[in-house]
Amino acid sequence: MSKIKLLFYIITLVFIYSHNTIAQTQNTNIDGLVIKDFGCSIYGNITGNIVNRTSQNINKTIFIKVFDSDLDPIGSCEKPLNLEANSGKRIVVSGCNCFDGKSYKVIAR
């Protein structure tokens, strides 16, 4: 196998294991506020694109609770959010411990 092919396979594997998409869209407690491409990074951070589909600005804190397969809480994290009406942006919420997460609850307060 050539060095270029080997390098390509290694980069592909790193990409696959560095970001595990959990769900296409994760709803929140606010109608119209969702996280698309919701996922867990290799660092235990939640990543995605947060989208405000409402006609009002949202200035809240996002709280994420992570649960295992027995619905026991195994992690949590939070991040301040200031999002204009009908807009979206990339979000990374650190320290979530989402590696073994099977379900999630996202609340904006």
Image: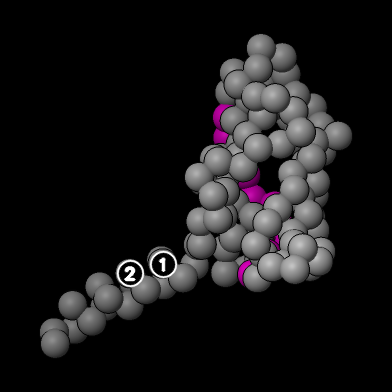
What residue did someone put label 1 on? 16
Q: Kindly identify which numbered label has been placed on residue 12.
A: 2
Q: Amino acid at mark 2?
A: Thr
Asked which quadrant contains residue 96, the reply is: bottom right
Q: Check the image and report above or below for 71 versus 6.
A: above
Q: Amino acid at mark 1?
A: Ile
> Which of these two is toward me, 75 or 91?
75
The residues tagged by marks 2 and 1 sit, at their Cα atoms, a distance apart of: 6 Å
In the drawing, does residue 25 fall left or right of residue 85?
A: left
Label 2 CA crowd tier, 10 Å (few <14, some 14–19, many 20+): few
Q: What's the magenta region?
A: 88-99
Q: Check the image and report above or below for 76 versus 99.
A: above
Please check the rendered image and state whether residue 94 is part of the magenta-colored stretch, yes or no: yes
| Disc 1 element | helix
Label 1 CA crowd tier, 10 Å (few <14, some 14–19, many 20+): few
Residue sitting at x 71%, y 36%: 28
Q: Where residue 29 appears, x then y in whole percent?
A: 76, 33
Residue sitting at x 57%, y 69%: 42
Split into 4 quadrants, where in the image is the N terminus? bottom left
Residue sitting at x 80%, y 46%: 63
In the drawing, does residue 3 fall left or right of residue 59?
A: left
| Disc 2 element | helix
Please check the rendered image and state whether residue 82 is part of the magenta-colored stretch, yes or no: no
Q: Are marks 2 and 1 in contact (CB under 8 Å)?
A: yes
Q: Where residue 102 appears, x then y in whole percent?
A: 65, 62
> Which of these two is toward me, 20 or 23?
23
Residue sitting at x 18%, y 77%: 4
In the drawing, does residue 88 fall left or right of residue 3?
A: right
